[in-house]
Each structure stands twice: as structure tokens, then as C-alpha cells.
Image (cartoon, rainbow, N blue to C red):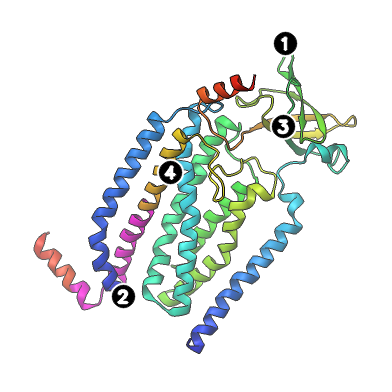
């Protein structure tokens, strides 16, 4: 259980289904959100970038916890698979944070009148991007894999405080960014016709995240276990099936 | 639990809590600087510095916007529900700028407590609604 080899084998069976579900939900969400959801009374069509911006931001924050918690598990219990999760989660999280910042800038110009402002929400989100980059770089800092993992996990843990700061920044300080539309405690302040495709997109991004994480973890597992007999066997089997 | 694991767990909890407390105290101490803008109340009470470039933010007061017919000059008032400040601006207002909506202005407070803005940004709220629903709500309110 929870050995890299076990994970590689079981995830191979999940992957086709996960990819299919990801594809279907994002296609439905994009077509519904961009083509059929009503436009906003004040912002017109430019509000539609919410269908990318919000899901990407959500997963950028959730992904950081996934990375930091698996880093902690790897430090405390020395579980190999947790190391692999942490390493694979960093580039995916960095990409999603970049997408959130980029779509935010594109959205900011027609609504606020500027691409960028140094308010608490946007600045803390930029810090999140740099934290992700730091974790990626620290993974390659030492030639010994164990040291690199420990350094990256420590940075990830130190950065966890940034997540509640990002989430609550719009309530704690005066910002240009508006408060959250989707709250844990109340109904979303959005018309259901607009909210339903957004929900599909959020589910789609969650599925995409899990799929991308598994694909990246499998590649990392093969790389780390390249000298074991099961990987060699796997490579030989592949070679027989698809001769180069 | 194994002693070594318990030690590592304690270390992880220690790192997370101490850095959280440190960052929390720092952002609490710097809260005035983290705020993007001053409120109209802090301008009236004199907390906001005069003749220094700052930002103020608030709601644009209904029926307070006047535009010059010959130039881009405009004046309006912003409120935070307690106090109001006059804003003077010479430039193009953002598309989303309108009365009853939020705005953030960059500029200076002059001696008469009028805010001379060099740039205006519109601030929108977190509510999204189709035009028909807004229309229906407006009709119902009348």
C-alpha cells in the first residue's frame, strides 16, 4: 500500500476515466459559460472571464495546501509517495496561479481601468506565485534528492500562512479587488443561470488538477524508480508492444 | 508514536505556527500601509496626509457627478457612509465608473480638503446579475 509501484499501477486504471470526465466537464462549462450564460448587467460580456479566473484561483490555493501537507507528511513519516505529490504539485500550482494573475489582469483593464494594482489580494497572489517558484527551484537545489525535498517542503510549510491571507485579504484590508462571490457560509451573490456553469468549471478544474497531478506523479515515479526491476520490466514490455 | 516522528511532527507544527504568528503580527502592524486607499472619513478627520500623493476610495454619491461640456474635467463626491469628499478629475473616467458604484482615486488633498485626482479606477462589487433581472428589480423598486 502507498508504494510508488502500487500507485503507478492503480492510477493507470483511473487515468482514462479522469481524463474523460475532465474533458467533458470543461467543454460543457466553457460552452455554457461563454456561449449561453446571460451577460452581466454592469460588466456585459467581460465578466465571462470569471469562468477561468475563479476556478484557476481556487485550485491555485487548494493546490498549495496539497503541496504543503504532502511535504509535511514526507518530512514526518518519510513516505516516498508524499514526496512525489509535493514535487508534482508545485509546477501545476504555479501554472494555475499564473493563469489566475493573467486572467485577473485581462479582466481588470475593462472593469477597473488598469491591468495591475498593488492591493492586498493581487500582491499576496503574486507572493503565492513566487512561493511556488521557490519550491520548484529548491527541488533542484541539492544533488541529493532527500535534501532537496526537505528544503522544498520547509519553504512550502512556511508559505502556508499566505493562503488564509489571500483568502481574507479582501475583508481585512481596503482593496480594489471585490469581496468573494462564492462563500462557504452563504448563497453565492450571483444569479443561478451564471453560477451553474461556474460550478461546472470549478468541478472541471478540480478534475483537471487531479488528472495533471497523477500524470506528473507517474512520470516522477518512473524517473525515481528507474533502477528497479519493475520499471525495467515495464520498459521492456512497452518496447515489445511498440517497437521504435 | 515513534520518538523521532513525534519530534519531526513537533518541528513542523512549530515552524508553521511561529511563521504564521510572525507574518500575522507584521501585517497587523502594517495594516495602515496594506490598505490600498484612505476613506473619506480619514480625509475629513485629518488622518490622511495633505499635499501628498495618496489614494482615496469609496462610493460615488448619486447625482454628484458633473462633467464639463468643453473639456474632460469632472467633479463628484465619494462617501464611506459617514463622510463625503469632493473629487476633481481632469481625464477619461473608466467605462465602469458610475454613480452609486465604488471608485478609487489617486491624487492629492489640497488645502480646502478637495481631492485633486490624477487617475481614477472603478471598483465593482461581487454581485453578478443578468440585465433583465436588474431591470425587473429596478422596476419593482419603483
Q: Residues within 10 Å of mark 3 (few under 14, many from 20)?
A: many
Chain to which the residue tagged by mark 4 belongs: A
What residue span does the magenta drawing correspond to?
Answer: A208-232
Circle 3 chain: B
Decide: is A103 above or below B59.
Answer: below
Q: Residues within 10 Å of mark 4 (few under 14, many from 20)?
A: some
Q: Position of residue A14 (x, y in %)?
A: 26, 59
Tell me the subunit letter for badge 1: B
Check disc 2 and report the residue beneath it: A3
Q: CA distance from mark 2 to mark 1?
A: 74 Å
Q: Position of residue A231 (x, y in %)?
A: 22, 72
User: Where residue A86 appears, x then y in whole percent?
Assistant: 43, 66
Q: Quadrant of the N terminus of chain A?
A: bottom left
Do discs 4 and 3 share a chain? no
Disc 4 marks which residue? A199
Q: Would you say the residues marked 2 and 1 are in contact, meaning their CB atoms lie under 8 Å apart?
A: no
Amino acid at each position: 500500500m502507498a508504494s510508488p509501484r502500487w500507485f503507478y499501477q492503480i492510477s493507470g486504471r483511473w487515468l482514462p476515466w479522469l481524463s474523460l470526465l475532465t474533458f467533458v466537464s470543461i467543454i460543457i462549462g466553457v460552452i455554457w459559460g461563454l456561449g449561453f450564460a446571460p451577460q452581466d448587467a454592469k460588466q456585459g460580456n467581460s465578466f465571462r472571464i470569471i469562468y477561468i479566473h475563479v476556478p484557476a484561483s481556487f485550485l491555485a490555493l487548494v493546490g498549495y495546501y496539497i503541496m504543503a501537507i504532502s511535504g509535511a507528511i514526507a518530512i514526518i513519516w518519510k513516505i516516498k509517495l508524499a514526496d512525489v505529490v509535493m514535487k508534482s504539485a508545485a509546477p501545476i500550482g504555479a501554472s494555475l496561479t499564473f493563469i489566475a494573475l493573467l486572467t485577473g489582469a485581462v479582466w481588470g483593464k475593462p472593469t477597473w481601468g488598469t491591468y495591475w494594482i498593488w492591493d492586498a489580494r493581487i500582491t499576496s497572489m503574486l507572493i503565492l506565485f513566487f512561493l511556488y517558484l521557490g519550491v520548484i527551484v529548491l527541488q533542484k537545489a541539492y544533488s541529493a534528492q532527500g535534501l532537496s525535498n526537505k528544503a522544498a517542503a520547509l519553504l512550502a510549510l512556511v508559505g502556508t500562512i499566505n493562503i488564509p491571507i489571500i483568502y481574507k485579504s479582501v475583508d481585512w484590508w481596503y482593496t480594489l479587488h471585490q469581496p468573494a462571490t462564492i462563500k462557504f457560509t452563504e448563497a453565492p451573490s450571483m444569479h443561478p443561470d451564471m453560477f451553474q456553469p461556474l460550478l461546472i468549471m470549478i468541478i472541471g478544474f478540480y478534475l483537471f488538477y487531479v488528472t495533471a497531478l497523477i500524470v506528473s506523479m507517474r512520470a516522477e515515479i518512473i524517473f525515481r524508480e528507474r533502477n528497479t526491476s519493475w520499471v525495467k520490466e515495464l520498459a521492456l514490455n512497452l518496447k515489445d508492444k511498440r517497437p521504435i | 508514536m515513534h520518538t523521532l516522528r513525534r519530534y519531526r511532527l513537533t518541528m513542523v507544527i512549530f515552524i508553521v505556527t511561529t511563521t504564521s504568528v510572525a507574518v500575522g503580527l507584521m501585517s497587523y502592524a502594517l495594516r495602515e500601509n496594506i490598505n490600498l486607499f484612505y476613506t473619506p472619513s480619514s480625509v475629513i478627520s485629518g488622518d490622511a496626509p495633505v499635499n501628498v500623493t495618496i489614494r482615496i476610495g469609496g462610493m460615488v454619491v448619486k447625482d454628484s457627478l458633473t462633467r464639463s461640456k468643453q473639456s474632460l474635467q469632472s467633479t463628484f463626491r465619494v462617501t464611506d457612509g459617514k463622510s463625503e469628499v469632493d473629487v476633481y478629475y481632469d481625464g477619461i473616467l473608466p467605462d465602469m465608473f458610475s454613480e452609486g458604484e465604488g471608485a478609487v482615486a489617486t491624487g492629492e488633498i489640497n488645502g480646502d480638503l478637495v481631492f485633486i485626482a490624477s487617475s481614477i479606477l472603478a471598483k465593482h462589487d461581487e454581485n453578478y446579475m443578468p440585465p433583465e433581472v436588474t431591470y425587473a428589480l429596478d422596476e419593482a423598486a419603483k
